[in-house]
């Protein structure tokens, strides 16, 4: 396998680096979304009950002790409940923007990897084909078909490697985008509910 990879030429190495970077980001994002996947509906219903009973300190304590960005936003909303509506909206928008940045962390790198690895693969193939035809010219056109086909399949290794990295990376990028949209939707619903708390 190692020898097979080496036959891909110099450009196989940045593709391999991209594959490692992609896998690292995918694992990190899976772990992140798993951690923040608290039972937010249950938490919010418990907090609503406490707020109706004017138990603000207990509601705040419950939000603060629950891990995740969404409980943090709930805690912020409870803390600022006595401010006017415009001020509450401004503070929650700022907290929401920070939350979105946390959700989207490293996703732009996944998109870059998905876009550049096929291009790196194609470049590797083009370079390999140029080298093959240069060899044909040097040999005066007297080249065995076996030698020629061997040069071509070696040149195509980088394209195959680039696509092998790009396709799953793109799939996971869109999967995580869906997760981000889902969390933002929940955040907006919570913020809307808590804006009316006084």
Image: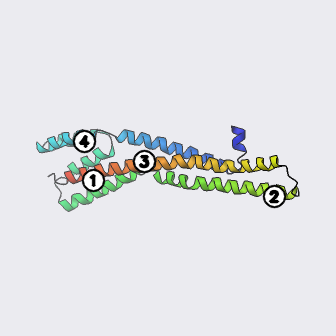
Label 2 with label 1: CB-CB less than 8 Å: no
Closer to the N terminus: mark 1 or mark 3? 3
Q: Residue at x 43, y 47 (%)?
A: 175
The CA distance from mark 1 to mark 3 is 18 Å
Mark yes or no: residue 18 visible: no
Please tell me which residue lies in front, 121 or 137: 137
Query: Which label's residue is closer to the chain start, 4 or 3?
Result: 4
**Tag shown at residue 188:** 1
Query: To which quarter of the image does residue 49 belong?
Result: top left
Q: Nearer the viewer, mark 1 or mark 3?
A: 3
Pointer 4 or 2: first along the chain:
4
From the image, state whether disc 2 or disc 3 is nearer to you.
2
Q: Which residue is mark 3?
A: 176
Residue tagged by mark 4?
41
User: Tag 4's secondary structure?
Assistant: helix
Residue holding disc 2: 134
């Amino acid at each position: 396998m190692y020898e097979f990879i080496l036959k891909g030429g110099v450009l196989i190495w940045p593709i391999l680096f991209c594959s490692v970077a992609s896998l690292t980001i995918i694992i990190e994002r899976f772990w992140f979304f798993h951690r923040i996947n608290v039972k937010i509906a249950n938490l919010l219903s418990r907090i609503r009950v406490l707020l109706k009973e004017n138990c603000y300190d207990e509601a705040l304590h419950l939000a603060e002790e629950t891990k995740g960005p969404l409980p943090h936003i709930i805690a912020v909303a409870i803390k600022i409940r006595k401010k006017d509506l415009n001020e509450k909206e401004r503070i929650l928008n700022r907290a929401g923007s920070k939350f979105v940045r946390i959700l989207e962390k490293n996703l732009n790198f996944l998109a870059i990897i998905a876009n550049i690895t096929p291009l790196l693969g194609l470049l590797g193939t083009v370079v390999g084909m140029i080298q093959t035809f240069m060899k044909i010219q040097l040999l005066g056109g007297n080249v065995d078909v076996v030698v020629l086909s061997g040069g071509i399949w070696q040149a195509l290794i980088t394209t195959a490697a680039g696509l092998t990295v790009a396709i799953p990376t793109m799939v996971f990028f869109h999967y995580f985008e869906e997760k981000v949209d889902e969390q933002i939707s929940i955040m907006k619903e919570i913020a809307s509910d808590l804006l009316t708390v006084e």
